[in-house]
Amino acid sequence: MNYSIISRFIALVCCGLLPAIGGYADQSSQDELQLDDLKVLGSPRTTSQKTFSIPGAVSAVGENRKMQSLDSVVRALPGTFTNINPTQGTVSVNIRGMTGFGRVNTMVDDVPQTFYGTSSNSSSKYHSENGGYGPSSQFGVMIDPNFLTGVSVTRGFSQGAQGVNALNGHSNLRTIGVDDVVFADSNIGLLSKYNYGTNGLGQNAMLAVASKRAAFDNGSIGAMLAYSGGKEKANYKRGDGTHSIQNDYVRRLDQSPRSWLAKFELSPSALHKIELAARGYQNSVGGRQTKNSNYYLRYKFDPASPFIDFTLLSAYTDNRQLYDNDANIWQLDKAKTDNRSYYLDINNISTLHWQDFTSSFTLGSSVMTNTYAKKALGVNKDNYDYTPFSPVGRQTIYSLYLINELTYQNFTLNTGLTYVDGTVRGHKGSCHALGSSDNSFADLGCFPKNAASMKLNSKSLQPSVMLSWDLNPWFKPFISYSQSTRIPNTQEVFFNNEGSGSMNPYLKPEQAKIYQIGFNTEKENIFTDNDFLGFKLTAYINHIKNYIHSQSFYITRSGTRITDLNHPDLYGDFHAQMYINALNPIKHKGIEIALEYDSDTLFANLSYSRQKTALPLDVSSSIGTGFGTTSITYLPEDYATLTLGGRFFERDLTIGSIFKYTGKSRREVPNGLEVDKYGNDSQALPKIPIIIDLYATYRLNKHVLLKASVQNLSNKNYVDALNSLNSTGSQVGTDRDDNYVYSFTNSARGRTFLLGAEIRF
């Protein structure tokens, strides 16, 4: 991708075309387009406050001005967490203990993200990491936080295109647009951000320029170009005074991401709106260059007819990895990957009124193709065929969805039906003989015997229903039931640590049945004029059938495939780490609480989650005896975030404190597979203390905002939950009697100071 050409083109649009068109445009002011139809009680509500009008487990947060990391922003939402993998340079959203493509549909501007990253060995050696780690893989989103204006999450009840291949829910990261840069009374605008942090956080900055003018018949035209970059060091001082560089895992983890974003908006009239967007991201981390390119077209037609509210979204995404010359994937080198996805969603909303009934009916369809390709050089053909690095394949997902929202007086019945047709394609090599044995893999469950192009197809019908009652501002109960599915990923079907002997062309889709019950409170003018109180309580039970996880399989001399490594008749060193469907359903249950109070001078926010999950661990996730796929994902037993603060000097000065509580958490055992177990085991992390952050913002005027923060104020030494580096080889050793000795030295940052500013005019 030639970024300079694109930059020049967008600059031409911003600086050349707009003034020319503006000369013929109507210079009268145009009312701001109101995209959000959420119920507003008094003065305009914030993004998070609006969620208390929505029944169900829905959370959202607006632009981050507290100088928190994107992981911290997401973790502050109830029922939502992140899986941190410092070797990836991405964000991986975790909903109720699940993460990854298909289990959580993570989107950027409504476009699903499919990147599956794999870092290299922490050094160029093989099986000689000296306390380091081997390759590590995880689904994640490459996005610059400076471009984000908010994050929204829906847990357990998904409908429409966003609910397709979204087993446990979906999240959406929203990026800035023209109206976030240009003031309503201006035709041109500039937005800049700068942040600096001590203790290795370094600096990052963003600059956006945009122009918007009235044009045509009550229409408008606008364009924006933004660029962002930063530097972050992996070596930082921990709460105990030591530095992270004392652990080998900091190799190849410094980051210098660069990102750009361009948008072009055209409204020929009040009936039509066209948006073109392009976004690029590149980084160097984990021994390779990562690149993301995304382009989308969004068209909306709303002729003020009750029968037509039409939306089209078409997108193309390209994710690439190019490995450094000295980087290895086990013994593979000169590696690169390419993940391309195409996405199309078309829907129309019709609204009907009859007496006291109002019906909003949505009919839509979506299609997505998702392809993974790779190139690498192995020591020999067997080395290439038997190293599960970015398995190659293609997914195609078609959907047809119906949603009907029927309102009668204070009752709302939301029903939905989604039809999904999913296909996974890939190549499975021929089954071959095992060493000198006369038994081929064909006799041991390997099918088909000859090489073949495999096609796994599945169809599902997913109903959903939610009943809510707007009884009064204090009590708005809701209850829901929904079904969802996830088709297998190519990384699961074609996992090849034993070549074709570890592939599973019989994998079935995961299926979930989710029950939720709860209520909202949304009340203003309680203690003072125009104050706000919001409360949301949700309880849920989730039954998952055919849960996909990897398990170890061995072979006996009689040719039987077994899971017992201690079997006396074990043959050879065959060890297939195969993905299978769990025989028994998996059960999740929990409660989630969101509380918010806001007045002119005081504010408080609380999110609390408590859950019970029992997910089997993937044997392939271990670095010791596996291949570094996504590690442990189930959430801490409970966790909470409390924000308290006040506003002073006519609300220009805001001072706040953030308290982060994390309950009992676990990690995967660093030494990997235990001989007397069928899969990997987990162990408890040391107790995580309450982490306190302070922040302050001061608005000099409408153009300048100053920011400051102290993170980990008490300088606590702790190990963060769901960090993949908690389970590297640096965390285990042996004593003189060859007994395992475990350590917990993957500590988070100690006390860190941050300063920042935003300028907009």
Image: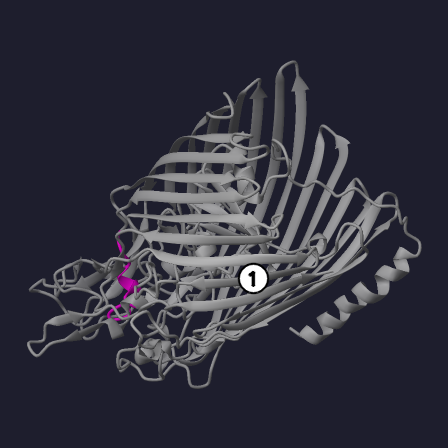
Outermost right residue: 24
Label 1: few (<14), some or many (≥20) within 10 Å? Answer: many
Q: Quadrant of residue 306?
A: top right
Q: Quadrant of residue 576?
A: bottom left
Q: Is residue 215 left or right of residue 289?
A: right
Quarter of the image for the N terminus: give it: bottom right
Q: Magenta residues?
A: 616-626
Q: Is residue 281 left or right of residue 335?
A: right
Q: Residue at x 50, y 44 (%)?
A: 603
Q: Is residue 620 magenta?
A: yes
Q: Residue 441 or 737: which is nearer the viewer?
A: 737
Q: Position of residue 655 (x, y in %)?
A: 51, 54
- Looking at the rendered structure, the secondary structure element under dot 1 is strand
Quarter of the image for the C terminus: give it: bottom right
Q: Is residue 78 above or below residue 573?
A: above
Outermost bottom residue: 326
Q: Is residue 442 magenta?
A: no
Q: Quadrant of residue 87?
A: bottom left
Q: Is residue 393 left or right of residue 230?
A: left
**Residue named by callout 1:** 707
Q: Is residue 719 above or below residue 97?
A: below
Q: Residue at x 63, y 32 (%)?
A: 42
Outermost front residue: 649
Q: Amino acid at mark 1?
A: Lys
